[in-house]
Image (tube, rainbow, N blue to C red):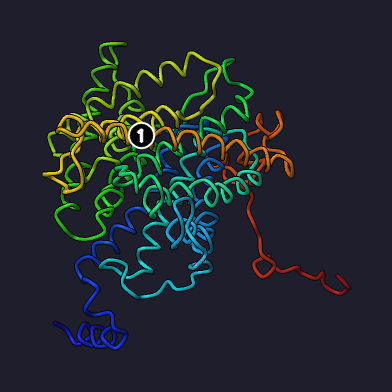
Amino acid sequence: MGRKAVLTLTALSGLGLAQELSGADTAWMLVSTALVLLMTPALAFFYGGLVRSKNALNTMLMSFAALAFVGVGWALLGYTLAFGEGGPWLGGLGHALLQGVGLEAKGTIPHLLFLAFQGTFAIITAALVSGAIVERMRFPAYLAFLTLWGLLVYAPLAHWVWGGGFLGQLGALDFAGGTVVHINAGVAGLVAALVLGPRKDYGRQAILPHSVPLTLLGAALLWFGWFGFNGGSALGANGIAALAFANTFLAPMATLVVWLLLDLFRTGKATAVGAATAIVVGLVAITPAAGFVSPFSALALGALSAFPSYFALLLRARTRLDDSLDVFAAHGVGGIAGALLTGLLAEKAWSGAADGLLFGNPAQFGVQALAVGVAVLYSALGTFLLLKLVGLFTPLRAGPKEEGLGLDVTQHGEEAYASGEGAILVLPEAAPPVLKPQGGEA
C-alpha cells in the first residue's frame, strides 16, 4: 500500500469511516457514476442524429441542459425528496441544500457518491423525455418544464420504489429503473407530444434523420454507459453487479437479432436506425430485471421485448401522434415489457430477492403490474399538469416561422453545419498601417 493510501485511510479513521467504507465498492461506484453521466451526452448524439440538420444543436442541447438544470435541482432538493427519511409518499427535507450529505457511509460507499450516482439517473430520465417534443418546443419553456419535472415527477416516483416508499414496501422489483426511469420518461414523452401537438410538417413531408452515423455513435455510447447504469445499481463490486453487467451484455444482443429479422421479413431491408433503436429497447427492457434474472432469462427477455416495441413503433407511425423519436415505443413500452417480464422471470436463486411467476411466485407478477400502473398514471398526470403550468407563463411551442427556419437559429443563434468559410476577422493590431502622403497631412 502506498504512502498516500495509508494517509487517506488514517484520515478516514479519524472521521470514523474506515471500518464502514469499502475501497472496492467505492472504486466501482466512482466508475459507474462516470459511465451513467456519459449516457446523457450519448443520448444527445443518439437524438441529434435523428432530427433534421436545422434542429440538431437544439436537440442535443436539450440533453446537455439536463446535466445542469436537473443536476442542480437534484443536489439542492430532488435527492432529499427521493431518498431523505420520510413517509411512504415522499422523502423528508433532511438533506435539502446538501445538508447531512458527506463522507459518511451509505451502505459501503460514501454518502456523497451515492447522491451523485442517483443524480445521474435523474438527469438522463428527464433528458429522455425531450425526444418526444424535438423540433418544436421553445427552449425557455423546456428548461422550466425540465427542472420542475425532475423535482415533482421523477423524485417522488424514485422515492416510492427505491427510497423506502410504498411500492418498495410492497416488494416491487426495479433493479435499475424500469418504472422510475423508462416507463416514467416514456409516458411523459407521450403526454408532452399530445399537449404540444405535431410538428408543422408532420404528415405532409418526409422528416428524415440528418446523420444516422451520429445516432449509431450515440447507441454505442449508451450501451457502454449502461454497464454502469445497471451494474452500478448493485451499489458495490459484488456478484450481483457481475450478474447485472452480464445481463446488460446479453439482452440487447437478443433484441437486436429479433429486430433485424423482423425488419428483413417485413421489408427485405435491415436499417441502421432500426438497429440503433433495437439496442436501446433491449437495454431498457433488461434494466428492471438486470440483477434479478439468470443470464439465460436475460436472453429470453431481450428477444421477447423486441416484439411489443417494434409493433408499437409501426402503429404510432400510422397515427397523427408525433412522438418524434418514439420515446414511448422504445422507453415506455420497453420499460413496461421489462417490468412485467421481471415478474415472470425473477429467480431468488440468482439474486436472493424474490422469485417470479414462472418460479413459483405468481404474486410477484401482480406487484409488478401494480407498479407499472402507478408509474403510468402518476407520470401522465404530473407531466400534463406541469406543461399546463409552464404554459401559463411562457409559450410552449415555437411559432410556425421559427419551426420553418429551424430551432438552432431561432432559439440559439447558431447552426450545427454552417455553409461557406465565414467572414475574415481583422483585429485592429493586425490591420495594415495607414501611409501618410509625402509633404502634407493625411
Q: Toward the viewer: 119 or 368? A: 368
Q: Is residue 158 shown left or right of residue 35? A: right
Find residue 197 and report its image quarter: top right
Say above or below: 274 vs 178: above
Q: Going 16% across and 44% down the picture, which residue do you hit?
A: 246
Q: Secondary structure at mark 1?
A: helix
- Which amino acid type is shown beneath numbered disc 1? Gly
Residue bearing mark 1: 335
Q: Position of residue 331 (x, y in %)?
A: 39, 34
Asked if 297 appears above or below 28 in the picture, the reply is above
Which x, y percent locates residue 120?
40, 55
Density class for disc 1 (Cα within 10 Å; few <14, some 14-19, many ≥20) is many
Name the image quarter holding the C terminus: bottom right
Percent coordinates x, y for residue 318 in the rendering: 48, 13
Say whether residue 158 is left or right of residue 412. left
**Residue 362 lies in what quarter of the image?**
top left
Left-right relation of 156 to 214: right
Q: Nearer the viewer, residue 165 or 136?
A: 165
Residue drawn where x is 28% and y is 53% of the image: 233
Q: Residue at x 21, y 71 (%)?
A: 23
Which residue is drawn at the image coordinates 44% and 62% (left, top)? 84
Q: Residue furthest right?
A: 441
Q: Quadrant of the N terminus?
A: bottom left
User: Camera-side residue: 265 or 355?
Assistant: 355
Residue 182 at what x, y percent from top left?
Answer: 40, 38
How many discs appear? 1
**Along the line of sight, which residue is nearer the eye, 308 or 262?**
308
